[in-house]
Amino acid sequence: MVILGGGVAAGYAAKEFVSQNGGKGQLAIVTAEQVPPYERPPLSKDFLAGGKKPDDILISDPSFYREHGITLFRGFSVSKVDFARRRLHGPSGRMIGFEKLLITTGSAVRRLNVPGADLPWIFYLRQLKDSQHIHAHIKRGKRAVVIGSGFIGMEVAAVLTNEGMNTTMVFPGDRVWEHVFTPPVSAFFEKQFADHGIMLMKDETVVGFEDKRNGRLVVLGSGVRMPVDLVVAGIGVTPALGLFRGSPLTHDQDGIRVNEYLETNVDSVWAAGDIANYPDAIFRRRLRIEHWDNAVEQGRVAMRNMMDKFQPFVHVPYFFSDEFDLSYEYWGNAEGHDHVVYRGVMKDKQLSVWWLKQGVLCATLLMNRPDEERRYAPRWILRRAKLNPAQLKTAKSLRSLDRTFGQE
Ligand SMILES: Cc1cc2nc3c(=O)[nH]c(=O)nc-3n(C[C@H](O)[C@H](O)[C@H](O)COP(=O)(O)OP(=O)(O)OC[C@H]3O[C@@H](n4cnc5c(N)ncnc54)[C@H](O)[C@@H]3O)c2cc1C
């Protein structure tokens, strides 16, 4: 068995292989990176701040792979997958054969396509080495511009600010992370960011960069020219599909299509993590999720299925994010919601947001809320619980609203 890609899904698939008593010499991981599989979330958090070393964020120690007879091909960038002959082609004509293949190539960062975008002080963040490069350029008192207001942009802006940089966020919408947050939640985060001294330039696009004798500039669509020392662009990712164009794998720009067992249309080939477009049993439509927990769980389930366990992937989507002293979690998928209920006291930094679609809970965001909300939110989303918005808003304890016992 071979895992193509050495990120989060691969790291947890390998752990699952061992816990299912996979035999020595039966699994190989092929990764373009020089590092064994590692956790990516710290790259925009404490690792970026310099608080962790590469060894601290490895999913498993290198000795784990040695002891369990798992071969790690590092620095092996696969240039072609020959599904007919069942081979991966790599550098210098090297080839690796497979009987069963798990594809976990993850995502590739979107890049800016404007004049000056290749200047060396413009950074993207996907890999460990990107985080190290950005860290090496952090300088107290200097100016940073972060492009994008999704969770990566927000986390990076928070770290750069904590490290003493004068940070500005530039983004096209009129509020932060409008794709996920509701207007009051965006307003809450904007206030926290402003209180930490971060400047927000909304409704702006970057049209170019200049590096002149008298300094570096970010040029905005409005004509503003901002002096800067360091730029980090967090403008989203796309599934890393380049290898599969023209292959027999069923895929489109939204990932590789898999069935509920995470199998692709090609015999004995599975896909997991950011790359996999799967039929979600809870929301009853196809989803592709670019978050850590999804990669962990899909890596595990795909590996079990490669080991003939036949387990469908049924899982409530989940992610977390940390900015300054704020940590929040999010379950579900709010697309198509028609009602939002808030609990908690935002000004005390404790809030929960409950998205409903025709009365059925479809997503929840929690920050500093009682444990019972953490327990009920994923359970209710999984069970497609119907909730009364007025009761949800005012209930002292959620226990009284729980009607999901025994419900499918
Ligand atoms: C900076 C950062 C912070 C994040 N923070 C959070 C967070 O706080 N919360 C959260 O829920 N999610 C977070 N995520 C998202 C989460 O880390 C990803 O969803 C997860 O890593 C996806 O796992 P994956 O295995 O699908 O892909 P990846 O982890 O990206 O791994 C893909 C692997 O495939 C390899 N590869 C690709 N192409 C080839 C090739 N041709 N040949 C060989 N190898 C190849 C890559 O080198 C890489 O090793 C963060 C992501 C980043 C980048």
Image (cartoon, rainbow, N blue to C red):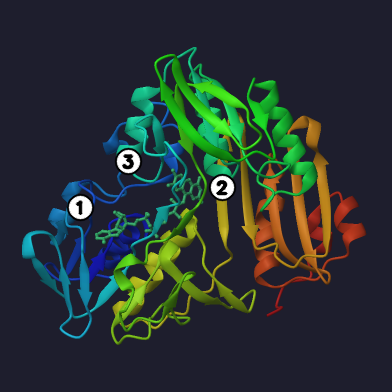
> Distance from label 3 to label 1 (Cα)?
20 Å
Q: Is the residue 284 above or below the residue 224 in the image? A: below
What's the CA distance linking mark 3 and mark 2?
19 Å
Residue at 86% x, 49% y: name it.
Answer: 396
Quadrant where the image shows the N terminus = bottom left
Q: Amino acid at mark 3?
A: Leu
The residue at the point 56 percent across, 24 percent down is 226
Quarter of the image where one finds residue 154: top right
Q: 59 and 102: which one is in front? A: 102
Q: How many marks?
A: 3
Which of pointers 1 and 2 indicates the residue nearer the eye?
A: 2
Q: Is residue 275 left or right of residue 29?
A: right
- Answer left or right for 369 relative to 162: right
Quadrant showing the C terminus = bottom right
Question: Residue 268: x and y, percent?
Answer: 28, 83
Q: Is residue 89 above or below residue 396?
A: below
Q: Residue at x 23, y 79 (%)?
A: 100
Separation of disc 1 and disc 2 at Cα? 27 Å
The label number, if any, that marks residue 128 in the structure image: 3
Pointer 1 local density, CA inside 10 Å: few below 14, some 14–19, many at least 20: some
Q: Which residue is mark 2?
A: 320
The label shown at residue 64 is: 1
Helix, strand or loop at mark 1: helix
